Structure formats: structure tokens, C-alpha cells
Amino acid sequence: MRSAISRRPMLGLLAGAASAGPLGRARAATPFTFQASWVNDAEFMGYFIAQDQGWYAAEGLELTYLPGGPDVIPESALLSERANLTLTTPDTTIKAIVDQGAKFKIIGAQYQKNPIGVVSLAENPVGTPEDLVGKVLAVPPVNVISVEAMLKINGIDKRSLRIVPYAYDPTPLIKGEIDASIDFTTNVPYTIEQAGKRAISFLLYDEGFTIYNDTVVVTEETLKTRRKELVAFLRASRRGWEENLKDPSAWPPKFAESWFKGTGRTIENEVYFNKAQKPLIEHPQGVFTMTEADIAKNIEALAQVGVKATRDMFDTTVLAEL
């Protein structure tokens, strides 16, 4: 997500095959559209595997997968009915619920710990929130809420540093034009290392802004009328993630000429990303789990910046059926 990095449309259509019904009779698969939150990279490995292995089809779904990107607002895909389900971050989704009356429900969380963090160069390290004082920090517009929350939680006046826009390109950091940036700590350090620099980072999550990322979001209407398909999607997706996390280096090379073709990124980058995200996704109760304790942490963290989340915005009943 990028805490919310809302992202670009690169329309792709991949449909699962029809599955067989009882006694071998053909059963028509149910169309279901998933809007991803960013361009095709390792952030979505579990879904790629589930699609390629036919696990959505086995659950009776004909899946259409829509990649995202910097120009895509995932929640808009739900409101426009272009997608049945999307990935977001709690801050943007809950603000839409509170400020705009959007009828959304959060039904799962891919990242138990948000991968968004502060990235800097080892030669000019920003290793703690306090180190940001007097520095220039580049922040994507969609992540400003998260950064302000982290600063507030740590007692740092946001006026004590200079915040400038960031477009997910670490070049200004590498050139020394900024001191740090907000980005996925699972990914951008690799890019920096390829430029001959060494990166360090810390998670906003570890500094008090304890929110999920890539939260699974649907409309209340979809939750009510398409529950069977939601259970099927999450079950197949969990299976894909479990397979992927067994060995994060195994699957990315298999997708070099399919999911990752034309992205401009190397497979080595995807392997690095996939390994780095493993501990942020895994949960003893299974991928997408939302415990009451962690939901409470999300609500508390969002309250620090005036985002009034409530327990009823999170629905764990679909997960209970997996």
C-alpha cells in the first residue's frame, strides 16, 4: 500500500476457468473482480499464485484482476462498481466512511504490520522519529495522515521538520536533495542499494502508528449479497499466500514472463521484496487475520489524528468462515 499508497490503472484481465460441480457436471463460475492497490509486484504474490494454480476457479470464481497504480484510488473502484473487492489502508477507508458516508467494511488485513516507513541513507541516517527534527522528509500526499500521526505519538512538532511531496522515486534521496522519504521499507531499499548506496529504515508501525495495510475492503451491499464469493476469494487467496511464504525466493522467477513482464523491475527486486514482507504478513491464525487486540490498536492509532474509527467498521465474520 505506500501506507495507503493509492495507485495507477494498468488494466489486466485474467479469468479463472469454470469449476466442476457435483458428479462431474460443469458448473458456471461466478464472475468476481479484484482491484489491486498498486502495479504488479511482490506485494500481490499470493493472489498471482492462487490465480495461476487455479485455486480461484476451484472455489467457483471467474476472477478478473485489475492492477492498480499511483492514479488509482482503490475505494473508487468499489463506489463505481468496477470491482467487488479491493485493498486499501484503514486511514483512507475510514476517513471515507466518516467524512463521506461511504458504506464500506474492512473484512481482512494482508499486512499485520504496515510496511510504510521512513527510509534514509546510512551516510545521513534518520533512524528514529527524533532524528527527523530539522530534516527534509518527502511524503506522498496519501501518507501525510500517517506521518502526522507518528510524529504526534512521539511528541514531535510537525513544524520542526520540512515535509515535501514524494512521487515514489528515491532519486532525490540518492542525490541528497532530501534527507528521508516515506515508502515501502520492503522495496525501496533495494533500489537504493542498486545505486551504490546503503539504506536504513524504520516502520511507522514500530513507532506507534499501529495500523494494518492492504486491508481487504468491500461495500456493505457486497458483504450482504455476495458472502459466498467473499469467503471463496479469501480462502483461495490465503492458500496462495501460504504457498508463497513457504519459500519467498521460489515463486517470483516463475512470473518473469507473465505477471512481472514489462514492469521495469528485476526478479531479484521481487525476491528481495517478497522476503522482506514475509514477517509483516504472517499470522499464527492465518493470513488476513484481524484479532480484537489488533483492531483496537488500529482504532487507537487513528484516533491520534482525529480519524474516528469504530469497531463496527471492521467485520471479522467472513474470516470466521474460512
Image: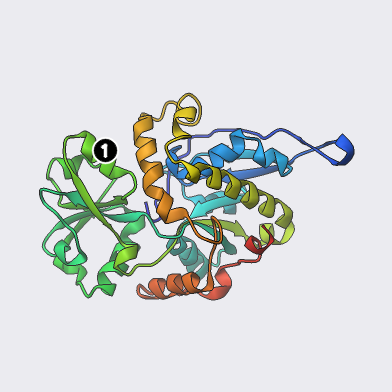
Could you say whether the residue bearing mark 1 is in a helix, strand or loop? helix
Q: Nearer the viewer, residue 20 or 64?
A: 20
- Residue 153: image quadrant is bottom left
Residue at point 38%, 37% (across, down): 271
Find residue 292 and report its horizontal and vertical position in percent.
53, 73
Find residue 25 and report its horizontal and vertical position in percent.
87, 35
Q: Is residue 108 left or right of residue 185?
A: right
Residue at point 46%, 54% (across, down): 281
Residue farthest to the top, as pictured: 257
Can residue 216 be seen here? yes
Find residue 110 and report its horizontal and vertical position in percent.
50, 54
- Residue 20: image quadrant is top right
Look at label 1 and name its amino acid.
Thr
Q: Name the residue beneath numbered marker 1.
A: 191
Q: Nearer the viewer, residue 76 or 137?
A: 137
Can residue 82 be seen here? no
Q: Is residue 108 above or below residue 63?
A: below
